Image (spheres, rainbow, N blue to C red):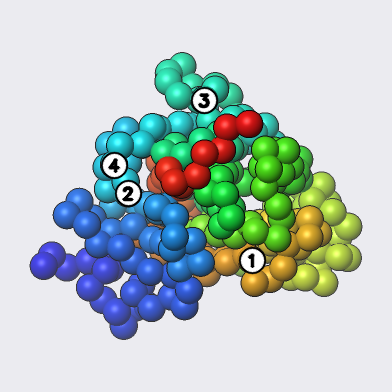
Amino acid sequence: MAEGPFNKPDKGFNNIPGWTWIGTYGGYYLQCNQLEEFEHGFFTRQWHGRGPEELVGYVSSGVSVHRPQQIHSALVLPAPQASQAPWPEADGLVSTKGGQSLWVCGADCTPVLVADAATGRVAACHAGWRGVAGGILKEAIQQMEAAGSKRKDLLVALGPAVSGPNYQVERQVSSQLGEIEQLQAIAAVLPDSKPGCDRLDIRRAAWWQLKQLGLTEAQISSCPLCTVAEPELFHSWRRDQVKAVQWSCIVSSSSVEMQR
C-alpha cells in the first residue's frame, strides 16, 4: 500500500470519534456515524479533479446528481432545479424525492449535510460566514419542514472546515453572525492579536445557529478536522491561495416518497 495519511494511524487520521473513513477502490472519504443510515460522504483532496458525476459512483448507484453554482449566499433550491448545467446559483439544496444525491463543495467553508431520519429527506449546504450570517441552515430546515419534516427528526453533520485558530477575520465580519459577546461565550469568536480582528470558528457558529433553531446537541455532529491544518487531506484557500475544492454529498432515501 502506498505511503499516505490513511495508513498512519499514529497521526490520528483513522481515529476520529463519531466519524469513519470509508475505503473504496478509488480512495477514501469520510462519513459521519450519526448519518450511517444515509449514503453520504465528505471527500478529500485525494479525489482532486473528479466531480460529482464521477464521485457519485463511489457513494451510491442509480441516483440522480444535483449541484449548485455556489456564490457564498443563503439561497437554497429544491434539487430538481439543479439537475443539469448550467448549474443554478445557490449554496444549498433540498431533496424532493428518494434517490437524489445532493452535492456541495468547498475549500475552508463548512459542508453541512442534513438528514431526516423519519422521511428520508435530505439537504446539503455550503456554509461559509456569509451563508451562516444569512441564515442558510434555517432556510434549508424550513424548506424541509414545509415538505413534511419535523425538527426533532433531523440529524446534522458539520464536515471538515477551517478551524477558529486558523481563521482570522475583521470584526465587521464576525459581528454579522450575531452578538459578539454571545459568540465569544460559545467560543465561536476567539481573540486575535491584531487590532480590529477576531479568530472565527465558523463551524461553532453554525452549531450555535442550529441550537437556536431548536436542535439538540445529540442531533448535531461536528467534525474536528481543520482544512488548513491538514494539507495531506484537504485543499485550503486560506493556506494555499489556490482555487481547488473537495466535494461532499448526501443521498435521499429511495424507500420514502417525498413528493407533496
Q: Is residue 234 above or below residue 106?
A: below
Which residue is the site of mark 3?
A: 80
- Taking the image as drawn, is residue 225 in sight? no
- Disc on the earlier residue, 1 or 3: 3
- Residue kind at label 4, given as amino acid type: Ser
**Mark-to-mark CA distance, 1 and 2:** 23 Å
Q: SS at mark 1? A: helix
Q: Residues within 10 Å of mark 4 (few under 14, many from 20)?
A: few
Residue 61's disc number: 4
Tell me the tag on residue 219: 1
Q: Position of residue 63 (x, y in %)?
A: 36, 36
Q: Secondary structure at mark 4?
A: loop
Extreme residue in the left direction: 1
Dot 2 surroundings within 10 Å: few (below 14), some, or many (20 or more)? Answer: some
Foreground pick, 55 / 201: 55
Q: Which residue is mark 2?
A: 59
Disc 2 residue type? Val
Measured Cα–Cα span from mark 1 to mark 4:
27 Å
| Mark 3 nearby-residue class (10 Å; few <14, some 14–19, many ≥20) | some
Q: CA distance from mark 2 to mark 3?
A: 20 Å
Position above or below: 67 against 164? above
Horizontal side, residue 127 vs residue 35: left or right: right
Taking the spot 63% from the left edge, 57% from the top edge, the residue there is: 154
Q: Considering only order in the chain, which callout, 2 or 1, is on the residue closer to the N terminus? A: 2
Residue type, numbered disc 3: Pro
